[in-house]
Image: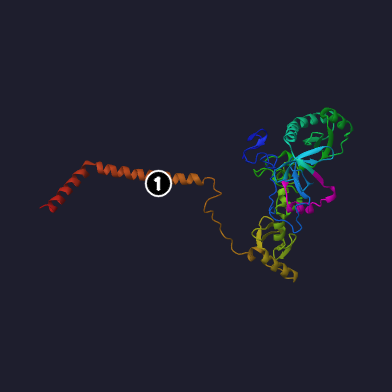
Protein backbone atom coordinates (compact mmCIF):
# COMPACT_ATOMS: atom_id res chain seq x y z
CA UNK A 1 0.00 0.00 0.00
CA UNK A 2 1.33 3.44 -0.87
CA UNK A 3 1.68 6.22 1.62
CA UNK A 4 -1.02 8.80 2.01
CA UNK A 5 1.17 11.45 0.43
CA UNK A 6 1.41 9.62 -2.87
CA UNK A 7 -2.06 8.05 -3.05
CA UNK A 8 -4.02 11.11 -1.97
CA UNK A 9 -6.13 13.73 -3.64
CA UNK A 10 -7.01 16.97 -1.86
CA UNK A 11 -4.89 15.80 1.11
CA UNK A 12 -7.19 12.81 1.66
CA UNK A 13 -5.88 9.25 1.21
CA UNK A 14 -7.70 7.23 -1.44
CA UNK A 15 -5.53 4.09 -1.60
CA UNK A 16 -7.01 2.57 1.57
CA UNK A 17 -10.53 3.70 0.51
CA UNK A 18 -11.19 5.37 3.87
CA UNK A 19 -11.17 8.91 2.43
CA UNK A 20 -9.05 10.39 5.19
CA UNK A 21 -10.83 8.58 8.03
CA UNK A 22 -8.36 5.75 8.61
CA UNK A 23 -7.07 7.42 11.78
CA UNK A 24 -3.47 6.35 11.26
CA UNK A 25 -1.90 9.61 10.11
CA UNK A 26 -0.46 7.83 7.08
CA UNK A 27 -0.53 4.31 5.64
CA UNK A 28 2.78 3.31 7.29
CA UNK A 29 2.18 4.63 10.82
CA UNK A 30 0.88 2.75 13.84
CA UNK A 31 -2.39 0.99 13.20
CA UNK A 32 -5.59 1.87 14.98
CA UNK A 33 -6.92 -0.37 17.73
CA UNK A 34 -9.51 -2.94 16.64
CA UNK A 35 -12.68 -2.44 18.68
CA UNK A 36 -13.72 -6.03 19.50
CA UNK A 37 -16.36 -4.74 21.96
CA UNK A 38 -18.09 -2.41 19.50
CA UNK A 39 -21.40 -4.33 19.58
CA UNK A 40 -21.38 -5.05 23.32
CA UNK A 41 -22.86 -2.64 25.84
CA UNK A 42 -22.75 -2.71 29.61
CA UNK A 43 -25.97 -3.38 31.59
CA UNK A 44 -26.02 0.27 32.69
CA UNK A 45 -25.86 1.51 29.09
CA UNK A 46 -28.07 4.51 28.42
CA UNK A 47 -28.20 6.58 25.27
CA UNK A 48 -28.55 9.76 27.34
CA UNK A 49 -25.34 9.15 29.29
CA UNK A 50 -22.10 10.88 28.17
CA UNK A 51 -19.75 8.60 26.29
CA UNK A 52 -15.94 8.42 26.31
CA UNK A 53 -13.87 8.33 23.13
CA UNK A 54 -10.22 7.92 22.27
CA UNK A 55 -8.81 10.49 19.83
CA UNK A 56 -5.54 10.11 17.93
CA UNK A 57 -3.29 13.03 17.00
CA UNK A 58 0.08 13.13 15.26
CA UNK A 59 2.22 9.97 15.46
CA UNK A 60 1.35 7.92 18.55
CA UNK A 61 -0.17 10.68 20.70
CA UNK A 62 -3.62 9.72 21.98
CA UNK A 63 -5.96 11.12 24.59
CA UNK A 64 -9.42 10.42 26.01
CA UNK A 65 -12.39 12.78 25.69
CA UNK A 66 -16.05 12.88 26.66
CA UNK A 67 -18.84 13.68 24.23
CA UNK A 68 -22.43 14.72 24.59
CA UNK A 69 -25.08 12.06 23.94
CA UNK A 70 -26.57 14.15 21.12
CA UNK A 71 -23.39 13.87 19.01
CA UNK A 72 -23.25 10.86 16.70
CA UNK A 73 -19.53 10.11 16.28
CA UNK A 74 -17.94 6.96 14.90
CA UNK A 75 -14.40 5.66 14.47
CA UNK A 76 -12.55 7.64 11.80
CA UNK A 77 -14.47 10.90 12.25
CA UNK A 78 -12.41 14.09 12.43
CA UNK A 79 -13.42 16.04 15.55
CA UNK A 80 -12.63 19.36 17.21
CA UNK A 81 -11.72 18.83 20.87
CA UNK A 82 -11.07 21.02 23.88
CA UNK A 83 -7.48 22.12 24.53
CA UNK A 84 -5.69 24.18 27.16
CA UNK A 85 -6.05 27.21 24.87
CA UNK A 86 -8.25 27.17 21.79
CA UNK A 87 -9.16 23.81 20.26
CA UNK A 88 -7.35 20.88 18.71
CA UNK A 89 -8.26 18.58 15.80
CA UNK A 90 -7.84 14.81 15.81
CA UNK A 91 -9.27 11.55 14.51
CA UNK A 92 -11.46 9.25 16.61
CA UNK A 93 -9.59 5.95 16.99
CA UNK A 94 -11.74 4.06 19.52
CA UNK A 95 -15.29 4.08 20.86
CA UNK A 96 -17.50 1.96 23.09
CA UNK A 97 -16.69 -0.16 26.13
CA UNK A 98 -13.09 -0.77 25.10
CA UNK A 99 -12.34 2.90 25.83
CA UNK A 100 -13.19 2.41 29.51
CA UNK A 101 -10.88 -0.60 29.68
CA UNK A 102 -8.05 1.47 28.18
CA UNK A 103 -8.75 4.32 30.60
CA UNK A 104 -8.64 1.93 33.55
CA UNK A 105 -5.39 0.44 32.27
CA UNK A 106 -3.75 3.88 31.93
CA UNK A 107 -5.27 5.12 35.23
CA UNK A 108 -7.00 8.14 33.71
CA UNK A 109 -8.83 10.46 36.10
CA UNK A 110 -12.41 11.04 34.95
CA UNK A 111 -12.59 14.57 36.37
CA UNK A 112 -9.65 15.71 34.18
CA UNK A 113 -11.13 14.49 30.88
CA UNK A 114 -11.72 17.23 28.29
CA UNK A 115 -14.72 17.56 25.98
CA UNK A 116 -15.38 17.02 22.31
CA UNK A 117 -16.91 20.17 20.82
CA UNK A 118 -18.19 18.96 17.47
CA UNK A 119 -17.35 17.19 14.27
CA UNK A 120 -14.69 19.14 12.42
CA UNK A 121 -16.03 21.47 9.77
CA UNK A 122 -14.35 21.85 6.35
CA UNK A 123 -12.82 25.12 7.60
CA UNK A 124 -11.34 23.34 10.65
CA UNK A 125 -9.84 20.65 8.42
CA UNK A 126 -8.32 23.22 6.03
CA UNK A 127 -6.66 25.14 8.87
CA UNK A 128 -5.42 21.87 10.41
CA UNK A 129 -3.92 20.68 7.10
CA UNK A 130 -2.25 24.03 6.44
CA UNK A 131 -0.46 24.02 9.78
CA UNK A 132 0.54 20.37 9.35
CA UNK A 133 2.22 21.30 6.06
CA UNK A 134 4.39 23.86 7.91
CA UNK A 135 5.76 21.43 10.51
CA UNK A 136 8.78 20.21 8.55
CA UNK A 137 9.92 23.74 7.68
CA UNK A 138 9.43 24.89 11.29
CA UNK A 139 11.50 21.95 12.57
CA UNK A 140 14.46 22.86 10.35
CA UNK A 141 14.24 26.51 11.37
CA UNK A 142 14.02 25.57 15.06
CA UNK A 143 17.15 23.45 14.73
CA UNK A 144 19.01 26.37 13.17
CA UNK A 145 17.99 28.75 15.98
CA UNK A 146 19.06 26.31 18.74
CA UNK A 147 22.38 25.73 16.97
CA UNK A 148 23.05 29.47 16.70
CA UNK A 149 22.45 29.79 20.46
CA UNK A 150 24.95 26.96 21.11
CA UNK A 151 22.49 24.72 22.95
CA UNK A 152 23.26 20.99 23.26
CA UNK A 153 19.90 19.71 22.09
CA UNK A 154 18.20 18.27 19.00
CA UNK A 155 14.73 19.18 17.77
CA UNK A 156 13.35 15.88 16.44
CA UNK A 157 9.68 16.66 15.80
CA UNK A 158 7.18 19.53 15.67
CA UNK A 159 3.40 19.35 16.18
CA UNK A 160 0.96 22.21 15.64
CA UNK A 161 -2.31 22.41 17.51
CA UNK A 162 -5.39 22.13 15.31
CA UNK A 163 -6.12 25.86 15.37
CA UNK A 164 -2.43 26.87 15.16
CA UNK A 165 -2.43 28.71 18.50
CA UNK A 166 0.27 26.46 19.98
CA UNK A 167 3.26 24.61 18.58
CA UNK A 168 4.89 21.73 20.50
CA UNK A 169 8.58 21.05 19.88
CA UNK A 170 9.94 17.64 20.90
CA UNK A 171 13.66 17.52 21.64
CA UNK A 172 16.34 15.18 22.98
CA UNK A 173 19.21 16.24 25.20
CA UNK A 174 21.62 14.55 27.57
CA UNK A 175 21.73 17.46 30.02
CA UNK A 176 19.69 20.42 31.19
CA UNK A 177 18.91 23.13 28.63
CA UNK A 178 18.36 26.83 29.35
CA UNK A 179 15.21 27.79 27.40
CA UNK A 180 14.89 31.45 28.40
CA UNK A 181 16.40 32.99 25.29
CA UNK A 182 15.37 30.07 23.07
CA UNK A 183 11.64 30.42 23.74
CA UNK A 184 11.81 34.15 23.01
CA UNK A 185 13.44 33.45 19.65
CA UNK A 186 10.87 30.76 18.85
CA UNK A 187 7.92 32.97 19.81
CA UNK A 188 9.13 35.74 17.51
CA UNK A 189 9.88 33.35 14.62
CA UNK A 190 6.71 31.21 14.79
CA UNK A 191 4.22 33.68 16.34
CA UNK A 192 2.59 30.99 18.46
CA UNK A 193 2.60 29.72 22.00
CA UNK A 194 5.68 27.50 22.46
CA UNK A 195 5.63 24.20 24.36
CA UNK A 196 8.96 22.35 24.78
CA UNK A 197 8.80 18.61 25.59
CA UNK A 198 11.82 16.43 26.20
CA UNK A 199 11.62 12.82 24.99
CA UNK A 200 13.96 9.84 25.14
CA UNK A 201 16.00 8.39 22.32
CA UNK A 202 13.56 5.50 21.92
CA UNK A 203 10.67 7.92 21.45
CA UNK A 204 12.76 9.84 18.93
CA UNK A 205 13.37 6.76 16.78
CA UNK A 206 9.64 6.00 17.01
CA UNK A 207 8.81 9.42 15.59
CA UNK A 208 11.51 9.39 12.90
CA UNK A 209 11.11 5.73 11.87
CA UNK A 210 13.49 3.59 9.82
CA UNK A 211 14.53 0.03 8.93
CA UNK A 212 16.02 -2.27 11.55
CA UNK A 213 18.79 -4.85 11.21
CA UNK A 214 16.10 -7.51 10.67
CA UNK A 215 15.07 -5.81 7.42
CA UNK A 216 11.68 -4.68 8.67
CA UNK A 217 10.35 -1.32 9.87
CA UNK A 218 11.19 -0.42 13.45
CA UNK A 219 8.80 -1.90 16.02
CA UNK A 220 8.66 1.40 17.90
CA UNK A 221 7.47 3.26 14.79
CA UNK A 222 4.90 0.66 13.65
CA UNK A 223 3.16 -0.98 16.61
CA UNK A 224 5.14 -0.80 19.88
CA UNK A 225 3.81 1.78 22.35
CA UNK A 226 5.08 0.44 25.68
CA UNK A 227 8.79 1.29 25.96
CA UNK A 228 10.11 -0.95 28.72
CA UNK A 229 13.65 -0.72 30.00
CA UNK A 230 16.09 -3.21 28.45
CA UNK A 231 19.30 -4.30 30.17
CA UNK A 232 22.16 -6.66 29.39
CA UNK A 233 20.65 -9.37 31.61
CA UNK A 234 18.11 -10.05 28.84
CA UNK A 235 20.99 -10.79 26.45
CA UNK A 236 22.73 -13.04 28.98
CA UNK A 237 19.60 -15.10 29.54
CA UNK A 238 19.37 -15.68 25.77
CA UNK A 239 23.06 -16.67 25.56
CA UNK A 240 23.95 -13.70 23.34
CA UNK A 241 27.39 -12.18 23.17
CA UNK A 242 27.55 -8.79 24.90
CA UNK A 243 28.47 -6.84 21.79
CA UNK A 244 27.13 -3.25 21.90
CA UNK A 245 27.31 -2.86 18.12
CA UNK A 246 25.03 -5.87 17.54
CA UNK A 247 22.69 -5.39 20.50
CA UNK A 248 22.06 -1.65 20.00
CA UNK A 249 19.27 -0.34 17.81
CA UNK A 250 19.09 2.83 15.75
CA UNK A 251 18.33 4.83 18.88
CA UNK A 252 21.71 3.84 20.36
CA UNK A 253 20.05 1.89 23.17
CA UNK A 254 19.59 -1.86 23.56
CA UNK A 255 17.05 -3.31 21.12
CA UNK A 256 13.49 -3.57 22.41
CA UNK A 257 13.15 -7.00 20.78
CA UNK A 258 15.48 -8.45 23.44
CA UNK A 259 12.46 -8.42 25.76
CA UNK A 260 10.13 -10.25 23.35
CA UNK A 261 11.40 -13.81 24.05
CA UNK A 262 12.92 -13.18 27.46
CA UNK A 263 10.06 -14.80 29.42
CA UNK A 264 10.35 -18.01 27.36
CA UNK A 265 14.07 -18.26 28.07
CA UNK A 266 13.57 -17.58 31.78
CA UNK A 267 10.95 -20.35 32.01
CA UNK A 268 13.20 -22.77 30.11
CA UNK A 269 16.25 -21.99 32.26
CA UNK A 270 14.27 -22.71 35.43
CA UNK A 271 14.89 -26.45 34.87
CA UNK A 272 18.62 -25.96 34.29
CA UNK A 273 21.22 -26.29 37.05
CA UNK A 274 23.23 -23.20 37.87
CA UNK A 275 25.81 -22.14 35.28
CA UNK A 276 28.29 -21.86 38.17
CA UNK A 277 28.16 -25.64 38.71
CA UNK A 278 31.56 -27.38 39.10
CA UNK A 279 31.91 -31.16 38.72
CA UNK A 280 34.56 -33.20 40.57
CA UNK A 281 35.88 -35.89 38.22
CA UNK A 282 38.80 -38.30 38.30
CA UNK A 283 40.63 -36.08 35.78
CA UNK A 284 40.01 -32.91 37.78
CA UNK A 285 37.38 -30.23 38.15
CA UNK A 286 35.12 -29.30 35.22
CA UNK A 287 33.16 -26.08 34.91
CA UNK A 288 30.28 -24.96 32.67
CA UNK A 289 31.34 -22.99 29.63
CA UNK A 290 28.15 -22.93 27.53
CA UNK A 291 24.40 -23.48 27.90
CA UNK A 292 22.25 -24.80 25.04
CA UNK A 293 18.63 -23.98 25.89
CA UNK A 294 17.07 -25.67 22.85
CA UNK A 295 18.84 -29.03 23.25
CA UNK A 296 18.73 -28.86 27.06
CA UNK A 297 22.46 -29.37 27.35
CA UNK A 298 25.28 -27.79 29.30
CA UNK A 299 28.82 -27.92 27.98
CA UNK A 300 31.65 -28.58 30.42
CA UNK A 301 35.41 -28.41 30.12
CA UNK A 302 38.33 -29.11 32.44
CA UNK A 303 40.17 -26.31 34.16
CA UNK A 304 43.52 -27.79 33.08
CA UNK A 305 42.46 -28.57 29.51
CA UNK A 306 39.87 -26.13 28.19
CA UNK A 307 40.22 -27.17 24.54
CA UNK A 308 37.84 -30.13 24.73
CA UNK A 309 34.19 -29.43 25.49
CA UNK A 310 31.72 -32.09 26.65
CA UNK A 311 27.91 -31.72 26.27
CA UNK A 312 25.86 -33.16 29.12
CA UNK A 313 22.08 -33.46 29.23
CA UNK A 314 20.60 -31.51 32.15
CA UNK A 315 18.80 -34.57 33.56
CA UNK A 316 22.05 -36.58 33.58
CA UNK A 317 23.83 -33.55 34.97
CA UNK A 318 21.49 -33.38 37.96
CA UNK A 319 22.37 -37.00 38.80
CA UNK A 320 26.08 -36.20 38.63
CA UNK A 321 25.60 -33.20 40.90
CA UNK A 322 23.82 -35.41 43.46
CA UNK A 323 26.76 -37.85 43.38
CA UNK A 324 29.19 -35.00 44.04
CA UNK A 325 27.05 -33.82 46.95
CA UNK A 326 27.37 -37.30 48.49
CA UNK A 327 31.16 -37.06 48.18
CA UNK A 328 31.47 -39.46 45.22
CA UNK A 329 33.97 -38.46 42.53
CA UNK A 330 32.52 -39.24 39.12
CA UNK A 331 34.29 -40.78 36.13
CA UNK A 332 35.93 -38.64 33.44
CA UNK A 333 33.47 -36.87 31.18
CA UNK A 334 34.67 -38.57 28.00
CA UNK A 335 33.85 -41.98 29.53
CA UNK A 336 30.46 -40.88 30.75
CA UNK A 337 29.32 -39.55 27.41
CA UNK A 338 27.93 -41.84 24.76
CA UNK A 339 29.57 -42.38 21.38
CA UNK A 340 29.53 -39.31 19.26
CA UNK A 341 26.87 -39.31 16.52
CA UNK A 342 28.31 -38.51 13.14
CA UNK A 343 26.26 -35.74 11.57
CA UNK A 344 25.76 -35.99 7.83
CA UNK A 345 24.80 -32.91 5.87
CA UNK A 346 22.38 -34.53 3.42
CA UNK A 347 21.43 -31.36 1.63
CA UNK A 348 25.01 -30.00 1.76
CA UNK A 349 23.75 -26.75 3.22
CA UNK A 350 27.19 -25.69 4.44
CA UNK A 351 28.98 -26.61 1.22
CA UNK A 352 29.59 -23.61 -1.02
CA UNK A 353 30.49 -25.77 -4.04
CA UNK A 354 27.40 -27.98 -3.91
CA UNK A 355 26.00 -26.57 -7.13
CA UNK A 356 29.30 -26.86 -8.98
CA UNK A 357 29.55 -30.57 -8.18
CA UNK A 358 26.09 -31.23 -9.55
CA UNK A 359 26.83 -29.37 -12.78
CA UNK A 360 30.07 -31.31 -13.26
CA UNK A 361 28.31 -34.66 -12.78
CA UNK A 362 25.58 -33.61 -15.18
CA UNK A 363 28.15 -32.52 -17.73
CA UNK A 364 29.90 -35.90 -17.43
CA UNK A 365 26.61 -37.72 -18.00
CA UNK A 366 25.89 -35.57 -21.03
CA UNK A 367 29.37 -36.14 -22.47
CA UNK A 368 29.02 -39.91 -21.96
CA UNK A 369 25.65 -39.91 -23.71
CA UNK A 370 27.10 -37.91 -26.59
CA UNK A 371 30.03 -40.35 -27.04
CA UNK A 372 27.65 -43.34 -27.00
CA UNK A 373 25.39 -41.74 -29.59
CA UNK A 374 28.38 -40.95 -31.80
CA UNK A 375 29.59 -44.56 -31.60
CA UNK A 376 26.14 -45.83 -32.56
CA UNK A 377 26.04 -43.45 -35.52
CA UNK A 378 29.46 -44.65 -36.72
CA UNK A 379 28.39 -48.25 -36.48
CA UNK A 380 25.25 -47.59 -38.44
CA UNK A 381 27.04 -45.57 -41.07
CA UNK A 382 29.83 -48.14 -41.51
CA UNK A 383 29.51 -49.75 -45.07
CA UNK A 384 30.62 -53.18 -43.82
CA UNK A 385 27.87 -53.22 -41.24
CA UNK A 386 25.38 -52.07 -43.85
CA UNK A 387 26.28 -55.02 -46.17
CA UNK A 388 25.97 -57.49 -43.30
CA UNK A 389 22.64 -56.05 -42.29
CA UNK A 390 21.31 -56.12 -45.89
CA UNK A 391 22.40 -59.77 -46.37
CA UNK A 392 20.77 -60.78 -43.14
CA UNK A 393 17.56 -59.04 -44.23
CA UNK A 394 17.51 -60.95 -47.58
CA UNK A 395 17.98 -64.30 -45.83
CA UNK A 396 15.14 -63.53 -43.45
CA UNK A 397 12.86 -62.52 -46.33
CA UNK A 398 13.59 -65.82 -48.26
CA UNK A 399 12.77 -67.89 -45.19
CA UNK A 400 9.53 -66.06 -44.65
CA UNK A 401 8.56 -66.16 -48.40
CA UNK A 402 9.81 -69.54 -49.92
Q: Quadrant of the N terminus?
A: top right
User: Residue 54 in the image: x percent, y percent?
Assistant: 75, 47
Q: Residue at x 73, y 37 (%)?
A: 121
| In the image, farthest residue toward the bottom | 326
Which residue is located at x 84 percent, y 34 percent?
194
Q: Measuring from the top left, give residue 345's x and y in whole percent.
A: 54, 53
Question: For residue 37, what is the image quadrant?
Answer: bottom right
Q: Secondary structure at mark 1?
A: helix
Q: Residues within 10 Å of mark 1 (few under 14, many from 20)?
A: few
- Find disc 1 in the rendering and name its residue: 365
**Viewer-proximal residue among 366 and 162:** 162
Q: Which residues are magenta?
A: 93-115
Horizontal and vertical percent for residue 13?
Answer: 65, 37
Residue 323 screen position, x and y as percent: 72, 70
Residue 98 covered by magenta stretch = yes
Using the rendered view, name the quadrant where residue 169 is placed.
Answer: top right
For image coordinates 56% across by 57% down, the residue present is 343
Residue 117 visible (yes or no):
yes
Tag count: 1
Camera-nearest residue between 48 and 319: 48
Residue furthest to the right in view is 180
Residue 104 located within the stretch drawn in magenta: yes
Amino acid sequence: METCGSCSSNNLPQGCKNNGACGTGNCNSKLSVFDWLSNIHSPEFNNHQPQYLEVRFKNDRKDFYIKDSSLAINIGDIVAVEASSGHDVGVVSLTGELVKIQMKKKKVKYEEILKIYRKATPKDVDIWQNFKAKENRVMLEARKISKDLGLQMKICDVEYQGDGSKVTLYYTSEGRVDFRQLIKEYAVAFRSKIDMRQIGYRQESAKVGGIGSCGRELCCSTWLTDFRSVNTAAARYQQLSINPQKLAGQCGKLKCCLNFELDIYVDALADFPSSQTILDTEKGKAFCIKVDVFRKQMWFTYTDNSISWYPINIYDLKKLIELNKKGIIIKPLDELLEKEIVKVDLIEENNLNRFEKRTKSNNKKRSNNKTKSKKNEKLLNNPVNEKKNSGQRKKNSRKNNP
